[in-house]
Amino acid sequence: MQDHLNDKEIVEQILAKKKELGEKLLILTHHYQRKEIVELGHYRGDSFGLSQKAAADKAARFIVFCGVHFMAESAEILSQPHQTVQIPDLEAGCWMADMADIYIVENAWEEITSITGEDSVMPIVYMNSDAALKAFCGHRGGAVCTSSNCPTAFRWALSERDKILFFPDQHLGRNTGNQMGIPAEEMIVWDPHKPLGGNTRDDIKKAKVILWDGYCLVHTRFRVEHALKMRERFPEAKIVVHPECTQEVVALADAVGSTSFIVKYVESAPPNTTIIIGTEVNLIERVALENPDKKVLVLHHSLCPNMFKINLKNLLWALDHVGQVNVVKVPEEIKADARMALDRMLALEPKTTPAKRGDLVKERQVAGVAVS
């Protein structure tokens, strides 16, 4: 990395690299990235949508994912043989994803299915997980889900089997179960550090949804008192939060949805609307800048330090060594099973045509983001 350069010089060099590599390069930027990183990307969005768009771009050889590690893994799982996926900082992980690894999930599966029988439980894994867990689900007939399509995945799973094992985020799972009208007593939490996950055999037999004891540190920082305080200060405001928040916070919100949902919610709101958002602060600050005709406020300041590890210096370093450093590779046997779980998810969704690169750039220009 070139520590002697200032930010303006680094940006100029990144732009020169983009011009030099042309359509061979794709820089993907997640919604939670710093503003200066988003402005340098070709696409921005949610993790899976970005991976799909990269895989559909046949001209792209080098995919640089500005996000956390599981996102780059998803891009690698979906990538074409000629594509190489990199991440600017290999240390950009995800605490929630790390709360469930393949070994403890396999142990939990053995405990649960020894009581229920393997054919009665459908494993559903959140996109925010490593490739081995996606492969675990693919191998056992299960699927991946996103925060947007979790209810669709749950309905499918319960039409196929009696129970769901959902991991790693208990709050997305519980909020989805609540939305579907599943009684609270039929949703239990599995603590992997306790025998039978801290449950009785009867609890497991009666449960419709078994929720892994995992959570997002960004979204569980939002508390009931934050919502009540902001509601008191801005009684006319709309509160919108991410479904990784606790059910108590979700119950106090006017709307709940994924990062893409939140962006669209603000964009489609009437002028002069006050909107209070409970998600990662970089997204909120950028949405506020892009919608100056609305008052966009944070429910509570909550930053993802792992997303923040991606910066101008390590992005330039990745581009200076394009296709060579911090390359993310998923073993073929894991990739095949993980792809099955992703394909099952896609089979549940309405068919859509991925946008072309130019369409996405145009979309971002309309939103007021500088695009090179």
Image: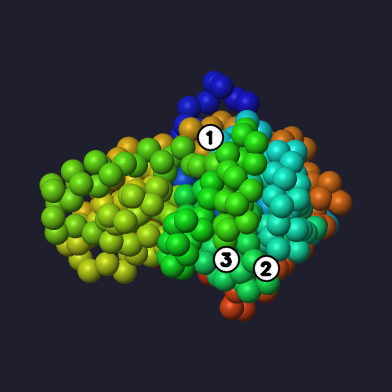
User: Which badge, 1 or 3, is on the more N-terminal residue?
Assistant: 3
Residue 20 visible? The answer is no
Residue 234 visible? The answer is yes
* Residue shown at the point (63%, 48%) measured from the top left: 201
Label 1 with label 3: CB-CB less than 8 Å = no
* Residue shown at the point (20%, 62%) measured from the top left: 273
Question: Disc 3 on helix, strand or loop?
Answer: helix
In this view, the mark in front (2 or 1): 2
Residue picked out by circle 3: 154
Image coordinates for residue 31, horizontal then vertical, percent: 47, 51
The quarter of the image holding the N terminus is top right
Q: Give 61 or 156, whichever is nearer the viewer.
A: 156
Q: Quadrant of residue 67?
A: top right
Amino acid type of the residue tagged 2 in the rendering: Arg
In this view, the mark in front (1 or 3): 3
Amino acid type of the residue tagged 3 in the rendering: Phe
Question: Disc 2 on helix, strand or loop?
Answer: loop
Question: Disc number at residue 161?
Answer: 2
Q: Is residue 253 left or right of residue 346?
A: left
Image coordinates for residue 240, horizontal then vertical, percent: 32, 57
* Residue shown at the point (76%, 63%) measured from the top left: 119
Decide: few, some or many residues near mark 2? Use Cα within 10 Å; few <14, some 14-19, many ≥20: some
Q: Outermost residue, bottom direction?
A: 351
Residue picked out by circle 1: 306
Amino acid type of the residue tagged 1 in the rendering: Asn
Q: Is residue 338 left or right of residue 307?
A: right
Q: CA distance from mark 1 to mark 3?
A: 29 Å
Label 3 with label 2: CB-CB less than 8 Å = no
* Residue shown at the point (63%, 62%) measured from the top left: 163
Q: Give 113 or 272, whichever is nearer the viewer.
A: 113
Image coordinates for residue 8, horizontal then vertical, percent: 46, 34
